[in-house]
Image (cartoon, coloured by chain):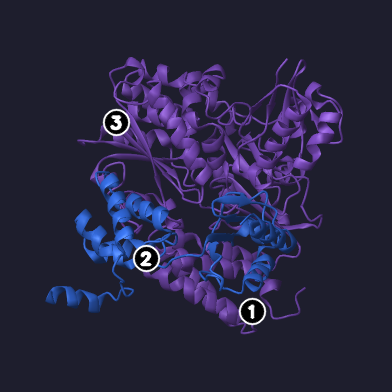
Amino acid sequence: MTTTLYVPCDASALSLGAEATAKAIIAEAQRRGVEIRLVRNGTRGMLWLEPMVEVETAAGRVAYGPVKARDVAGLFDAGFLQGGTHALALGALADHPYLKNQERLTFARVGITDPLSLDDYLVHGGYRGLPAALAMAAPAIVQEVTDSGLRGRGGAAFPAGIKWKTVLGAEGSQKYIVCNADEGDSGTYSDRMIMEGDPFVLIEGMTIAGMAVGATRGYIYLRCEYPHAYRTLNQAIATAYARNYLGQDVLGSKRAFDLEVRLGAGAYICGEETSLLESLEGKRGQIRFKPPLPAIKGLFGQPTVINNVITYASVPIILDRGAPFYKEYGMGRSRGTLPFQLTGNIKHGGLIEKAFGITLRELLYDYGGGSYSGRPIRAVQVGGPLGAYIPASQFDAVLDYEEFAKIGGMVGHGGIVVFDDTVDMAAQARYAMEFCAVESCGKCTPCRIGSTRGVEVIDRLVAGEQKQEVLLRDLCETMLAGSLCALGGMTPFPVLSALNHFPEDFRNVNRP
Amino acid sequence: MKGQLQEQALHPMPAARPLAAAERAKVLEVIVRLRALPGALLPVLHGVQDALGYVPPGAVTLIASELNLTRAEVHGVITFYHYFRSTKPGKQVLQLCRAEACQSLGAVALEQHVKSRLGVDFHGTTADGRYTLEPVYCLGNCACGPSLMLDGELHGRVDPQTFDELLASARGAA
């Protein structure tokens, strides 16, 4: 009898040795004359347990992890193909405390299916939203997305349905669907996990968007730091074309949708939507003045929907299950779920998809298990390099777009970077300015010059010139109010939050 | 001709060694394959860098004239993006993550170790031409840092010791 095993092909799993594990399993099975079928799935998102191997047994899938190549022979000895007990055994994952209480809507299939198998996608509930959309009039699709309460998951949280409605109503000879897959924020990888672990859900979501607004061309603008996702997306797109889910006649509807992946080239600013559009047009990624909005004049001057990966990937289930189903999740004006990403100095790093309304403390301690180093957690940065540093006294803050903003935070893309008590917050503030200087597109002065001056002012402040604090605050005010986009306009958030919550780190005393 | 000289004075570009015939053929192949794409410049530059390891300054004029752009536009795009390089890299490119999540797990100390071990700063190539060291701002491996990418292969939980082992095994494999 052939036993089916799963070893993730996700980049994080590979970074911890999944390829060597997979090869060792194949070699060991051959040596023992055992027939196996090895599936390369996405990751379940319990990244501290990668490489995680799952075995299909009579009692369902059971997991082992982290499995290094050197553990493989021992696992065979322990009879893991029949679910045998072993020090690395994790049991059935459905009962695992990390996964049990998650609300996986967007990530329903990630880690379970073979990302490149369209049949797997279909068996597990894929391509149900698109046929539903094809049976609806365009305004009805847009209305469904509006009613679901889905807001842009890239960080700005603008209601997706409103954006789509603008594009639907705009005149243009060629409308576009653009996916922002330039996931450059440190502490985030949910886009990558979807693209590597369930690429068809993104393709389906973008196709639905095309049908909703009358766009026949789509682009996925992918950062070049994600070579694994690039390969997976291209293979999935080729399969979708071959099976008529993309092309001139999508599912026999006589309606066209073409999709192509384009690579960025290492510029953080290209995650800003207008800069991304410039880059797609083959130019320097300098931001555009708004208005006009991309919805009116976007790619090549045409009406363009631009959303991020998770936004599109959340659309199929909305069209499949209906807006009320999705809206059930969440709180206040933050409806649905968000994939939170626990990263940095955290014991149990990984992806947790939950409805809005969970607190930082629940994520950090109930899921995360505290710091990786075992030392107290001193600060977390939420929402990427432009998000504020949150001190331990605020860990009861609720993660909801509006609630979290009340404490000066930004939920953003759901990335949470954890620091223990060895962190030097003045160094983090300096890094925020340095990063802005490296990545500024150069179009506006507060960002281009302010960031460099910011590094200098922080250096002088830390060297003991206390009056530089006034200057630093003044500079931050200028950047906040005077920058053209979020890069210059939000770099002050990590800087000021570090200064306000951890002033002792900015004083020239003997810090550890 | 006069106009061209003036342009050169205003936009100092790296001294452009004329392309060798083989390089020129590769660049042209990429251009012919991709020129019809809307917004073709980034795909073309990626194609050239994939083929040659860098975008030789001598290719700028060719790319510009074939895509109906000015040399300044092409030069401007190459220099805007961190990923595109104008000089030949070492045999392998080592991208070391500098971003916050990796910092929280000791990326700053790792960076110092890597630099002293290789004897180069960021953007530098080792004396033996083996490695080019580049900073990168996030590889999307933030729960398993510190991270680096060696020729497209991602490595997580890297510390000075595992870095040395990685170099040793890369050397052994070569």
Q: From mark 2 to mark 1, how far is it between C-alphas? A: 33 Å
**As shown in the figure, which amino acid type bears the numbered disc 2?**
Thr
- Quadrant position of the C terminus of chain A in the picture: bottom right
Which shade is chain B?
blue
Q: Which of the 4 quarters of the picture holds residue B63?
A: bottom left
Q: Residues within 10 Å of mark 3 (few under 14, many from 20)?
A: many
Q: Nearer the viewer, residue B52 or A508?
A: B52
Q: Which chain is purple?
A: A
Locate residue A444: give its quadrant: bottom left
Tag 2 residue: B79
Q: CA distance from mark 1 to mark 3?
A: 55 Å
Of mark 1 and mark 3, the one earlier in the sequence is: 3
Looking at the rendered structure, which numbered label has been put on residue A216?
A: 3
Tell me the crowding category of disc 1: few under 14, some 14 to 19, or many 20 or more residues within 10 angstroms, Cα based: some
Chain letter for mark 3: A
Is residue B70 rendered to the left or right of residue A319? Answer: left
Which chain hosts label 2?
A: B
Q: Is residue A418 left or right of residue A306?
A: right
In front: label 2 or label 1: 2
The answer to whether residue A415 is visible is yes
Q: Which residue is mark 1?
A: A462
What SS does tag 1 mark? helix
